[in-house]
Amino acid sequence: MTKRSKHTLPWRVLWLIPVGLIAALSIVATGGSGGDDDGLDDVEAPLVILPNYNFFLGNLNDGALLTADVGGEFTATIDIDGLLAGNLDLDVGANNTVTFLSYLIRAGNSIDIIISSPEGSPLDGTISVTVTSDIVATVDEPPTSGVFTVFAGPPANATVTILANGVQLALGAGEAIDYTWEEYTALQEDELAETWQRHASLAGSALQFIIEQFFSVADILDDLELVTLNNPLVATCDMFTGSPPEGVLAQGQVTVTWLGSGELSDGDDFTWELNNCWSLDDEELFDGTISLEDYTESVDFNSGVLFSIGFGGLGAGAPGGVIFDLTFSETVEAEGVWTIPADGVIALSGGFVLNIQQP
Amino acid sequence: MLLLATILLAAGVLVYALDRGGAVYFLSFWTSAAPPTGSPGSLGNHLPTFLHTLAFILITAAVLRPWPKLLLPVCATWFGIECLFELGQMATSNGHVAVVLPAWFEGMPVLEITSAYFIRGTFDALDVVSIALGAIIAYPLVRLFTQGDRT
């Protein structure tokens, strides 16, 4: 007969495994509602859109990072560290038409920008950008406050402090120098500027670029229901005010196609095709496709409040997202004739996962 | 101890039901036809956290009984586990937690809101205090239950 030592834990200790699991699940289950796969189907109340939401951008789970080939001169790839998180203020009009008013990028966010040029450049390498104080901006306007640091190698971090009408740049503990937004943006192409200043300028442009792409997609979220009713939805773009560039239509169009059927539901895909689509405001020509894959939407169980909406899942391995195969071409007018400068074409590939959630 | 733990957990559920109704995932059956009927006030925001920590220490101690030398590590471990979940809700870490969650969580009961728990949840220092209180109070309470035990 064997006798168990009084110091040996008995088999009932194994009960601690389910106890731990139950504890973890019960903590998570006390969280807010959401994740209802049935989405709108179970909600009878009208959809309520709040005036404020959080937003999250992440890398595509297939590893295709958002990459811009700038005129064949260099490529800039944006690698989001975890999630790029922020907050949105919006105005909800009739029929739940949403207008984005302002946004905030939270302190703690960080991204890497990988610069590579075929002929080699002092700018080549990885630029690490970390937001150290919330960046606050009105939509379509430069930010008015916030701080981020930029590190592209020794000797020190550069600090970019956003002011009301520009920025202040400092290397390490060095003297801070004020720039207007125009001067700051121009630094990246100024071969006489210090490399750290050019990196700091590129970092600001990359942040601005990814936010612009986020809003370009977020802006059509409230039109998706309309697309399902008028599939495909075709709209004309601005007409060139003079002769268009050679081989370009005087007036292009944008076509949004829903690839689902029945009712709009989770997992649906859309394609957003731009054919010679010119923007008079930006004087830019867009060509290509934006694929919007794995639509997600959930609504609070009781209140009818939109809890989350977006494309692609935030979890590791979740499919979908916003995938670009798009060119932006700068257009220049001279004597009534529009042309595209050879170095004015940006080819965008890769993409990001996008999710907007109730705070 | 198990009975007391069960009562404490039931009390926590009751606080959620009264205070937040169907806004909580596991009480989603609590429809708008039965809205929150009363509120324990600001205490209701932290009482369940306190009760959860206390209850699971009691359950663990009951399973491990009679090993009194393990009581302090048990309290410390549960304090750590509960704090990790709370810290995971901090704005600077919630995104990092959410992206490492496996995709198969989507569509699985309870697990499907794990990312929402971390992203939507808000870190609250008072919750950490509640966890600490739960762990501290659990220690003499378990000692009281086990004072007659021989090891």
Image (cartoon, rainbow, N blue to C red):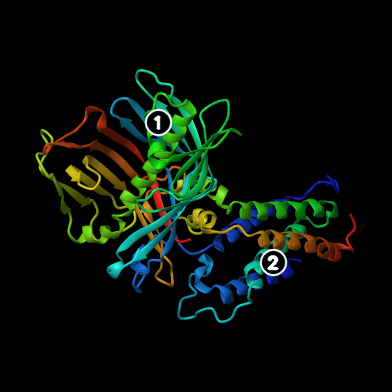
Is residue B101 in view? no
A102 up-or-down from A124: above or below: below
Residue A215 point in image, percent of width and height:
34, 50
How far apart in space, not on screen, are marks 1 and 2 (Cα)? 56 Å
Q: Is residue B130 left or right of residue B110?
A: right
Amino acid at the residue labelled 1: Gln
Residue carrying label 2: B51
Residue under the image location 32 percent in, 62 percent down: A98
- CB under 8 Å between discs 1 and 2: no
Residue A77 point in image, percent of width and height:
39, 33
A357 up-or-down from A287: above or below: below
Residue under the image location 22 percent in, 59 percent down: A228
Chain where mark 1 sits: A
For residue A100, which quarter of the picture?
bottom left
The lab-note entry on whether marks 1 and 2 share a chain reads no
Q: Is residue A136 left or right of residue A272?
A: right
Is residue A296 in view? yes
For residue A53, which quarter of the picture?
bottom left
Mark in the foreground, 1 or 2? 1
| Element type at mark 2 | helix
Label 2: few (<14), some or many (≥20) within 10 Å? many
Camera-nearest residue between A97 and B144: A97
Residue under the image location 55 percent in, 52 percent down: B91
Amino acid at the residue labelled 2: Leu
Residue under the image location 28 percent in, 69 percent down: A95
Residue carrying label 1: A188
| Element type at mark 1 | helix
Q: Residue furthest top?
A: A119
Q: Quadrant of the N terminus of chain A?
A: top right
A181 up-or-down from A89: above or below: above
Residue B55 point in image, percent of width and height:
71, 64
